[in-house]
């Protein structure tokens, strides 16, 4: 399997270098492009914080992001792009259950939580130029709207429970990225990028229900969740 993977990579590189000059030059004369990329999503700042003592912690884990882009060249090196994306990050509440166990001797708390799911649409500009005969560098800046869902959280110790309901909201978002494109054929490029996605959505009237020693209480709260992720992705670009 390892030998097959190495062979495929060598074949891609061979095709790239054999067509590099004509592909890079000809790509700038084409007005349209489409991309599809996927890669890991790394939570940053409060979003990825797992400190139970921090009320702003998002407890997010490393996840994944998928994005599709359709672009139009305004001039040779500047284009306008429309992006649709989906981002998912699981959660890790182990620090929260550990804190509850230390505060309530004799109880054994367990947790269950879904993923943070984010999807949306962005519009922005791309500046790209040929850094060499076989490599195009691109810089992108986007803004747009995202829809996100705060995951349902459930903490349980015997008959005692604490449940925070799932809640959805929308918010403004922004994204910056830098990318590199390598020609594979006359109209196809292998693209790799590093991006930064940020937003601070507001969740209104999130319901929480707790049952302690048979006594049930319900409350609601409103909070802003700082959401920032770094994304390293790769995929294919087609120019036409």
Image (cartoon, grey):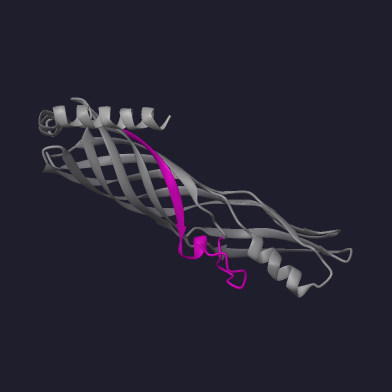
Task: Pick out the residue farthest to the front.
Answer: 3
Q: Quadrant of the N terminus?
A: top left
Q: Residue at x 59, y 70 (%)?
A: 55
- Is residue 240 or residue 133 the one in the foreground? 133
Residue 121 place in picture, x, y as percent: 40, 43
Q: Residue at x 55, y 61 (%)?
A: 58
Q: Residue at x 12, y 29 (%)?
A: 26
- Is residue 222 or residue 11 the one in the foreground? 11
* Magenta stretch holds residue 24: no
Q: Residue at x 85, y 59 (%)?
A: 158
Left or right relative to 54: residue 83:
left
Residue 168 place in picture, x, y as percent: 58, 50
Residue 213 place in picture, x, y as percent: 88, 66
Q: Looking at the image, can residue 48 be seen?
A: yes
Count how many numbered circles sit on residues in the image. 0
Residue 6 place in picture, x, y as percent: 33, 32
> Residue 35 falls in which quadrant of the image?
top left
Q: Start and end of the magenta stretch?
A: 35-58
* Magenta stretch holds residue 41: yes
Q: Looking at the image, can residue 237 be seen?
A: no
Q: Quadrant of the C terminus?
A: top left
């Amino acid at each position: 399997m390892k030998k097959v993977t190495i062979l495929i990579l060598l074949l891609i590189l061979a095709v790239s270098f054999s067509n590099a000059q004509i592909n890079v030059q000809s790509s700038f004369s084409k007005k349209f492009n489409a991309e599809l990329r996927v890669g890991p999503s790394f939570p940053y700042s409060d979003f990825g914080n797992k400190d139970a003592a921090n009320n702003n912690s998002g407890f997010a884990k490393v996840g994944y992001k998928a994005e599709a882009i359709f672009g139009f060249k305004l001039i040779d090196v500047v284009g306008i792009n429309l992006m649709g994306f989906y981002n998912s990050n699981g959660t890790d509440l182990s620090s929260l259950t550990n804190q509850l166990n230390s505060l309530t001797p004799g109880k054994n708390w367990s947790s269950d939580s879904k993923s943070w799911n984010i999807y949306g649409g962005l519009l922005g500009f791309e500046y790209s130029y040929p850094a060499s005969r076989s490599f195009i560098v691109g810089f992108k800046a986007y803004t747009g709207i995202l829809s996100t869902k705060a995951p349902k959280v459930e903490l349980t110790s015997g008959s005692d429970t604490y449940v925070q309901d799932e809640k959805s909201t929308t918010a403004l978002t922004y994204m910056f990225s830098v990318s590199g494109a390598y020609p594979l054929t006359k109209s196809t490029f292998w693209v790799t990028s590093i991006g930064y996605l940020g937003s601070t959505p507001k969740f209104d009237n999130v319901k929480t229900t707790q049952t302690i020693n048979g006594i049930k209480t319900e409350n609601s709260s409103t909070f802003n969740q700082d959401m920032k992720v770094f994304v390293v992705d790769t995929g294919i670009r087609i120019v036409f």
